[in-house]
Amino acid sequence: MNDKLIERVCEKCPATQWGKKSICSVHNLHVGKIETCPEWDNYIIENQGLMDRSGQLAFINLEPALEVVQKVEEESRITIGW
C-alpha cells in the first residue's frame, strides 16, 4: 500500500521532515495521512509502472512486455520452421 511508497519516496524527499514526526511540508500532514502524492506517481512511472496505487504488482505499460512476446514468437517460428 502507501507504506511502501512512504518508505521508498518520502524518506528521501527533501520536503519531508523525516524522523520523530515525519511531517511532509508540501502536504502539511504526517506522511502516514497522505493519500496521494505526485512524487509517488513519479516513482511508480520511473520504476516502469510495476506497482499500482494499492502496492500490488501491475503492468501499467504493456509495450515492453509485448515487444518481448513478439520477439520470442519470431524466434520460435524461425527455430521450429512455422
Image (tube, grey):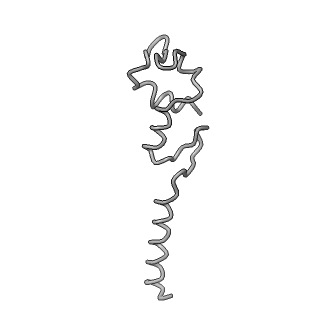
Relative height, residue 26 to residue 73 (above, below): above
Q: Residue at x 46, y 59 (%)?
A: 64
Q: Residue at x 59, y 20 (%)?
A: 33
Please state which of residues 80 and 38 is positioned toward the viewer in this rendering.
Answer: 38
Is 77 left or right of 34, judged from the image as shown? left
Quadrant occupied by the N terminus: top right
State the image quarter where residue 79 is shown. bottom left
Image x and y of residue 30, in percent? 54, 16
Image x and y of residue 68, in percent? 46, 66
Image x and y of residue 67, in percent? 46, 66
Q: Residue at x 49, y 75 (%)?
A: 73
State the image quarter where residue 11 is shown. top left
Is 32 left or right of 48, judged from the image as shown? right
Image x and y of residue 17, in percent? 43, 15
Q: How many marks?
A: 0
Q: Residue at x 57, y 21 (%)?
A: 32
Please state which of residues 79 and 26 is positioned toward the viewer in this rendering.
Answer: 26
Relative height, residue 45 to residue 34 (above, below): below
Q: Which residue sits furthest top?
A: 20
